[in-house]
Image (cartoon, grey):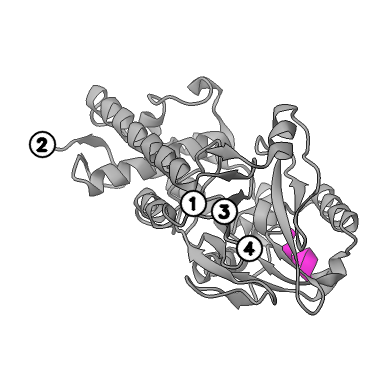
Amino acid sequence: MEITGTAQHDAWQQKALPPVERLRPDLWSIPVPIPHNPLRYVSVHAFALDGGGLGLLDAGWGSDESWAALTAGLAAIGAGVEEVRGVLVTHLHFDHLGLAARVRDASGAWIAMHPADAAAVARLTAAGAQAMVTAEVEFLVGLGAGRDEAVSDVGPPENLRAFTQMAVADRLLEDGEHADFPGWRMRAVHTPGHTPGHLCFAEERSRLFFSGDHVLPRISPNISTSPGGLPDPLRDYLDSLAAVRDLDPAEVLPAHEWRFRGLDARVDALTAHHEQRLAELLGAIRAHPGSTPWDLAAHLTWSRPWEQYERRMRIFAVTETDAHLRLLASRGLVVSSGGPVPAWTLALR
């Protein structure tokens, strides 16, 4: 794999925000910070459109700090937010969709997403923060969490309120459809796994591949189960990786970290990572039969000692463990006890 976003990579090593970059005569990368998050920023891509105006791919985290960075980035390329005609959103997470409503309010731009994620955003908006908290607590209890632990990790409704006030898409993009960016051939590539409606975009004129969170150069995106989410998200994710492996783009432009070449090699590495993780989980089940997803997460290798995991980090770890368990079950390698809280053992072969 070849690093092509050298300025992004250098900034990452220096723990700094990378510069606004002109990638092509009509394409720019604008880093928009994610407050208090190890990913640091999302790369918002701005496109000059035939006939005037701009298109954006993703919008950034919904905060005043991020808004200031986005508008300053647009000013640095000689543009303003009022020139934005449309926003393509790769998926529903707050660092990608959070500022979309503010962009739309300032410019009248349309917002486009895959129907699956657009429907999920509409459900969250209709249900409200308290319903979101209740659903997540019950989901975690169903994975083996004690109720007090689940309530503490999820937190109060006010912590999640912003996530229930995100923009609902004006337009829907199915797999294979082209975005309304005049002068560009932006083909939507549905890549479920990270979210049900995650979209990558293959630009057919320049052979650029905008991979969102589906393929990142350094880390594996979080693949987790969730209330009302995909029944087997890791299987979907691995299938989505295989579907893009041989596209052979000229360059991959992810939403985080840095640009690179060698999509096939990175897909192979991500696939191997998950197979190793599945093998580790099988070993944990062998050593601790009858364990819940909550318990099994504590027996896996993480980036820091398990005792340091709490709140959202622990939720991600447990739900990621659950996603791997579901794939093992679909392969016939493990079975659960059934009932409200599954306890997992190796399948008899």
Residue at the spot 53% in from the left edge and 55% down from the top edge: 249
Query: Counting residues from the N terminus, which is met first, the one under dot 2 or under dot 4?
Result: 4
Q: Which residue is mark 2?
A: 348
Q: Residues within 10 Å of mark 3 (few under 14, many from 20)?
A: some
- Contact (Cβ within 8 Å) of mark 4 with mark 3: no
Q: Secondary structure at mark 4?
A: loop
Inter-mark Cα distance, 4 to 3 = 22 Å
Measure the alpha-carbon separation of dots 1 and 2. 31 Å
| Residue wearing tag 3 | 250
Q: Which residues are magenta?
A: 99-104
- Which element is circle 3 on? loop
Q: Nearer the viewer, mark 4 or mark 3?
A: 3
Q: Give the distance between the C-alpha atoms of the residues marked 1 and 3, in whole angstroms.
A: 24 Å
10 Å crowding of disc 2: few (<14), some (14-19), many (20+): few
Q: Are marks 1 and 2 in contact (CB under 8 Å)?
A: no
**Residue 143 in view in this figure:** no
**Amino acid under disc 2:** Leu
On the image, which quarter does residue 276 sit in? top left
Circles 2, 3 touching at the beta carbon (< 8 Å): no
Q: Tag 4: residue type? A: Val
Of residues 244 and 301, which is closer to you in this image?
244
- Asked if residue 24 can be seen in this view, the reply is yes
Q: Amino acid at mark 3?
A: Ala
Q: In the image, which disc is placed on residue 194?
A: 1
Where in the figure is residue 22, as x and y percent of width and height?
A: 78, 53
Circle on res. 89: 4
